[in-house]
């Protein structure tokens, strides 16, 4: 838990890729990059406010699309809970809880997050430059694979 918290607090950049699988009907593919503003709350949770640009693969010559996300990492006794607060803390969407696996550097979702007919899962791996968070979203129309790479400022340009 201490190592994960240290990684979260030192994060300043995000790089991500989205790749639809064979069953996807969304076609949401591309790459993004942005800045992460990190704050802490009175309850000890860490809040990421991300902003940047997404480059859709379907239209590589089109202008990049701006994005903004807010994620809250809340520390519990034996796991960390991740929530999406894009529409504010009062409308937070709890995504999943992550617990350490066999090594202190690898975390996995405790249970799938169910949203309608879709199932979300995640894995997190701590590394020397930051951490990687991989998501899968599976459902009748979705087969999505997201790879977020969170990095410290000192590792700028290294993804």
Image (spheres, rainbow, N blue to C red):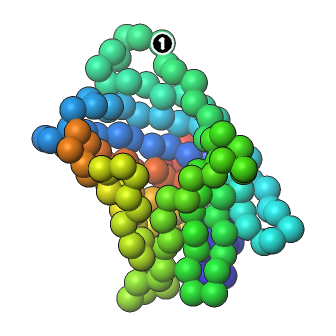
What residue is drawn where x is 63% and y is 41%? 86
Residue 127 versus residue 67: which sits nearer the camera?
67
Q: Above or below — where is 137 with respect to 86?
A: below
Q: Above or below — where is 31 with respect to 73?
A: above
Q: Looking at the picture, how far across and down is residue 132, in whole percent?
A: 46, 60
Q: Classify residue 142 by image quadrant.
A: top left
Residue 155 visible here: no
What residue is drawn where x is 53% and y is 68%? 128
What residue is drawn where x is 80% and y is 71%? 43
Q: Above or below — where is 74 with respect to 77?
A: above
| Side (left or right) of 43 relative to 53 | right
| Side (left or right) of 132 relative to 34 | left
Q: Classify residue 67 by image quadrant.
A: top right
Residue 81 versus residue 158: which sits nearer the camera?
81
Q: Looking at the picture, how far across and down is residue 36, in whole percent?
A: 67, 46
> Which quarter of the rendered picture does the N terminus lie within?
bottom right
Residue that protrudes farthest toward the front in the picture? 116
Q: How many marks?
A: 1
Residue that protrudes farthest toward the right in the picture? 42
Mark 1: which secondary structure?
loop
Residue that protrudes farthest toward the top in the picture? 62
Q: Looking at the picture, how far across and down is residue 143, in whole percent?
A: 23, 45
Q: Looking at the picture, how far across and down is residue 101, in whole percent?
A: 40, 84
Classify 10 Å Cα crowding around label 1: few (below 14), some (14-19), many (20 and above).
few
| Side (left or right) of 138 relative to 148 | left
Residue 154 versus residue 40: which sits nearer the camera?
40
Identify the residue position indicated by label 1 in the image. Answer: 63
What residue is drawn where x is 13% and y is 41%? 22
Residue 68 visible here: yes
């Amino acid at each position: 838990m201490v190592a994960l918290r240290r990684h979260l607090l030192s994060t300043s950049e995000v790089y991500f890729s989205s790749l639809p699988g064979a069953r996807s009907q969304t076609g949401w593919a591309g790459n993004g990059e942005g800045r992460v503003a990190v704050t802490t709350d009175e309850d000890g949770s860490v809040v990421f406010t991300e902003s940047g640009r997404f480059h859709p693969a379907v239209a590589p010559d089109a202008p990049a699309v701006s994005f903004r996300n807010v994620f809250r990492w809340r520390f519990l006794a034996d796991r960390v809970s991740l929530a999406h607060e894009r529409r504010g803390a009062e409308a937070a969407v709890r995504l999943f809880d992550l617990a350490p696996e066999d090594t202190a550097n690898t975390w996995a979702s405790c249970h799938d997050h169910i949203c309608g007919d879709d199932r979300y899962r995640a894995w997190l791996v701590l590394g020397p430059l930051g951490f990687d968070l991989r998501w899968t979203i599976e459902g009748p129309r979705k087969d999505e694979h997201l790879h977020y790479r969170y990095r410290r400022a000192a590792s700028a340009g290294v993804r």
